[in-house]
Amino acid sequence: MKTIATLLLFALAVPAYADAEFQKVYGCMRSNVPDTIRAQEIEFTSTDRTGATRVLRGKLIAKREDGLARISIRITSPANVAGASYLVRERKADSPEDDMFVYLPSVGRVRHITGAFANGALLGTDFSYVDAKIIQNTFAGADGKLEAPGEVDQRATHVLTLTPAHQMKDPSYSLVRMWLDQKTCVPLKADFYQGDKLRKQLTASAGSLTQSGKYWYLSQFDMNDLKEGTKTQIKFGGIDGSTKASPNLFDPNNFYKGN
């Protein structure tokens, strides 16, 4: 995008005190990714521009390992895509991008997601493979700043602007603006820009905020593709903190085999 360089220069020009405040809020958001295994049922309901719907169900398992997020999604229904699996392995801050992998039973092999493919639809939903990282608040590879406070659904919010780190190649978006609930640090709204155009929008009601121990998450939110006129609603079941996951679940060579 031609606007990325300008946006990055603007972000880097923010005073040090603002950077410190941004890091505090950004860190609060990321702290909602647990250190221990967290398993949840997950459901995607996609609606096309004609109103036709398609539902995918599966399981999401996530944890932090040495402070870095590990996210695995395995689809269980419908039958024609059962077994499709997706893995995110967050890299350290000095790495330009996270590692993402997908396994499709119809292909029969693991694919390392890079370049343009990373911007493709996740199993036919309105989430790209890159977008799916927001499910666990993993916005690695981003520079940002804290804007004036806002409000969503009558709740006070922090407003963050995230831009791609300079070392990222072919980023999906030139800018992401997020509204984080001040009490829980969970995003209630996010706008995704390509150049100066608003391409996608994530929205959630405050009633979807759910607590499990010290962690907060959304039980439901929508992703709207404004260009295509489509929408995907994502719902989560309750958290199961007793899951004992095999190390293979986060191994790029074996994650699709399940627990």
Image (spheres, rainbow, N blue to C red):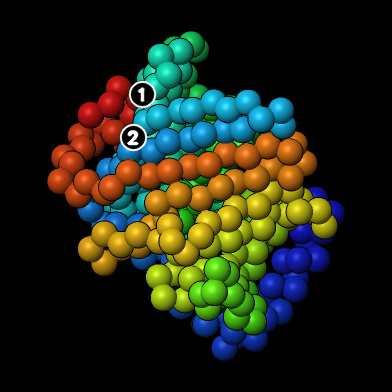
State the residue in front, 222 or 256: 222
State the residue in front, 120 or 164: 120
Residue 179's spot in the image, x, y percent?
57, 68
**Which amino acid type is shown beneath numbered disc 2?**
Lys
Task: Verify CB contact (< 8 Å) between mark 2 and mark 1.
Answer: yes
Q: Residue at x 59, y 84 (%)?
A: 18
Residue 37's spot in the image, x, y percent?
24, 48
Q: Residue at x 47, y 76 (%)?
A: 182
- Binning the other alpha carbons within 10 Å of mark 2 as few (below 14), some (14 to 19) or many (20 upward) gives some
In the picture, measured across the screen, residue 200 lies left or right of residue 17, that is right
In the picture, measured across the screen, residue 47 lies left or right of residue 6, that is left
Give the labeled residue for mark 1.
76
Residue 83's spot in the image, x, y percent?
38, 20
Quarter of the figure with residue 235:
top left
Give the labeled residue for mark 2.
59
Say how many tags the image has: 2
In the picture, measured across the screen, residue 235 lies left or right of residue 123, that is left
Quadrant (top left, top right, bottom left, bottom right) of the C terminus: top left
Mark 1 falls on what kind of element?
strand
Visible residue check, residue 36: yes
Gap in Å between the C-alphas at discs 2 and 1?
A: 8 Å
Residue 130's spot in the image, x, y percent?
57, 43
Q: Residue at x 51, y 75 (%)?
A: 155
**Which amino acid type is shown beneath numbered disc 1?**
Thr
For residue 210, which numbered disc appears in the image?
A: none
Visible residue check, residue 166: no
Relative vertical location of residue 52 with respect to residue 240 in this rendering, above or below: above
